[in-house]
Amino acid sequence: MKMGTALIYDEEMTKYKLLWVDPVCKIEVPERLTVSHEALIKTGLADRCISVPVREATDADILLVHSEEYLEAVKKTPYMTLEDLQEFTLQYGDVYFHPNIYHCAKLAAGAALQLVDSVMTGKVRNGMALVRPPGHHSMRSAASGFCVFNNVAIAAQYAKQQYGVKRVLIVDWDVHHGQGVQYCFEDDPSVLYFSWHRYEHQKFWPQLKESDYNSVGKEKGAGFNINVPWNKVGMKNSDYLSVFCHILLPVAYEFSPDLVLVCAGFDSAIGDPEGEMCASPDIFAHLTHLLMNLAGGKLCAVLEGGYNLTSLPQSVCQTVQTLLGDPAPRPANLDGPCESALESLHCVRSAHRQYWSCLKHAAELPTSDVTTKRIKLAEEEEDKLKKVEEEKNAEEEVWPEPPKRVAPAVRTALVLPNDVACPDGCKRFSSSEDPVIVNKLRKNFLKDADDSDALTSLSSLIALVEKMERNEICNGLALVPDVSMAMMCVVQHAATALRNRVLVVCVGDAGVSSHGTEDGKTLVVQFSNREPEEQKCKYHISVCLKKGCSDVSGFAQAVLGLLLPLGYEYDPSLVLLARTPDSGLCDSVWQQLTGLLQGIAQGHTLVLMQEAETSCVGPTASSLFGDAAPSLGKLHAPLPEDVEALERLRHRLQVDWKLLQTTAPETG
Ligand code: Q9C
Ligand code: ZN
């Protein structure tokens, strides 16, 4: 089932450059593409992709977004003299023209369309296009910010027109606001545009009022434009993940796109002279992974910005390697979002609470005078910091090169009863029984029962965990006679024999051992419809949903806004995912959960299910193997009592778990 990843690149797009002196434009160089492409070749990633040729976008394609007058004007630039080009450039902001840029701009837009074609026809599952010039700043009748044609906006219109795609999600993780994309789809509810961007209370380019959180879209499109302004530089991995977990993902799942387009700018990574942010290149592995189970996996990433010639290729490689299905590295330094990010998070969630049922219970915004006072204070503080900041140059920042990501030789191993067939591509696993393990199991779990089947299954399970710990196997699935006992057994083994932490996710009403939760070696998160007697401790969390896990919306909300941030912050080396036969969860939700959790613990997920659940082996193995989970469809509003219960729980836990915060300390 697993399909390929397209890579679209053509050297021709390196064949234009700035021909005069302009300090603003000098960072947009041909090397941006060559270093990115060379890194993909050197790491062997390019070879693993399906190479798709570029094409020139036609006039009709370009006119999906741009005016005839503008197209005609750009068409003349190949014949202009240097002086004419300079003069032509002057009518726009922060952009330059060159005799060959029109040709390249047609190829850049055409590359995005080729990518859409490849994904929509099923030739590949997903892909990335490395293009110049970028697109997201260009408007109907204007070039802007190094952009000539709006590659991604054209791709979105094209997908709707050619393939009848009903809903497109555009995720713009470039550090600048793609105002061109916003203007294009402002009143269009079929395209959800999300952008985070350096803003600094409108002091940062393009300095637009409409880049702020309160631009939510117009008329029928109200709610379908999401701006997350960063009011300070130096945003980190936690800030980015926090926005994904508490804004983008819940809304995206509720929206349920048929196609995901990414304005993949990497000027939001550390070292970039434009962004001045501090997120590490491997965060893009996670941002990518978290989007890969939407739209049945149909994701097209199109390069936008990225000006640090070290962090740019690193970030591109992280993105492509994740699209290829390799497990993401463990994310570093998730110490919670900063105060300024929390303020933005709060503002955005509050501005959108009337449009999205997943945000209905977001805290309201503080009264305006409080807000303005806070902003004033923030600005003063900032100006002081700015002076210090200016002294150190963002480009001189150093960070460790992301470690090489090695995918284990075996992706998915299955411990199955003999009469259950092993799905294609997966490996049936059984261990020759290690006497030490067997003795331990006998002593601890199987005292009286002389159940040799149980013993075989449990000792295989332990051997599997050890192989995962040594990164010889990525993930696994076991059908066991007794989920509770198997869970207990693995947790106890992990807590005593392994050095690292285990996240236990239990779906349904099974007895879960609290082994290791006293000292934080285990974090247990259990979902059921049973009200827990009392909330135990920081490391033992019961999520009670009215209809258990059978209400998809409530469960999705709990997973995205609670489980994912907890999992990321806890940063385990193994995720143990168990479900009871009566959990009420349908296959597609289970597959989504399995898929999303693989972003944690380097993809080391061990799934436990009851022996009788043979019909779930196929779908579960498919998710573990890296196939995209089927879409859940548009989500309805979750039960109000579930939303309230989740908010209360999140509120209570956020003292201990910083990634659960959604409001700034003083305003929350
Ligand atoms: N230092 C893209 O990343 N100049 N365009 C801003 C403030 C314009 C960036 C000047 C930057 C445009 C695609
Ligand atoms: Zn940018």
Image (tube, rainbow, N blue to C red):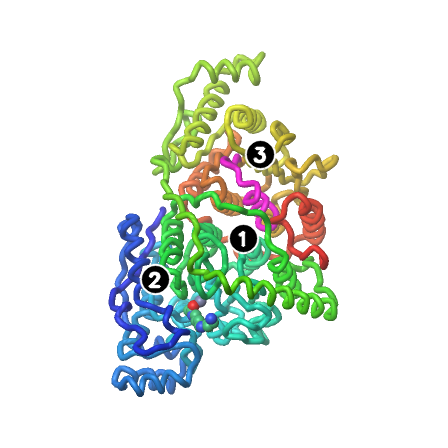
* Pointer 1 residue: 241
Residue 568, numbered circle: none
Residue 216 makes an appearance in the image? no
Tag 1, which secondary structure?
A: helix
**Which residue is under mark 2?**
129
Beta carbon of the mark 1 residue lies under 8 A of ligand 2: no
Marked residue nearer the N-terminal end (3 or 1): 1
To which residue does mark 3 refer? 580
Range covered by the magenta-colored residues: 560-576
Percent across and percent down for residue 320 are 37, 53
Quarter holding residue 32: bottom left
| Quarter of the image with the C terminus in it | bottom right
Between marks 2 and 1, how big is the CA–CA gap?
24 Å
> Label 2 neighbourhood size at 10 Å, few (<14), some (14-19), many (20+)?
many
Residue 19 rendering spot, x and y as whole percentages: 30, 77
Image-quadrant location for residue 117: bottom left
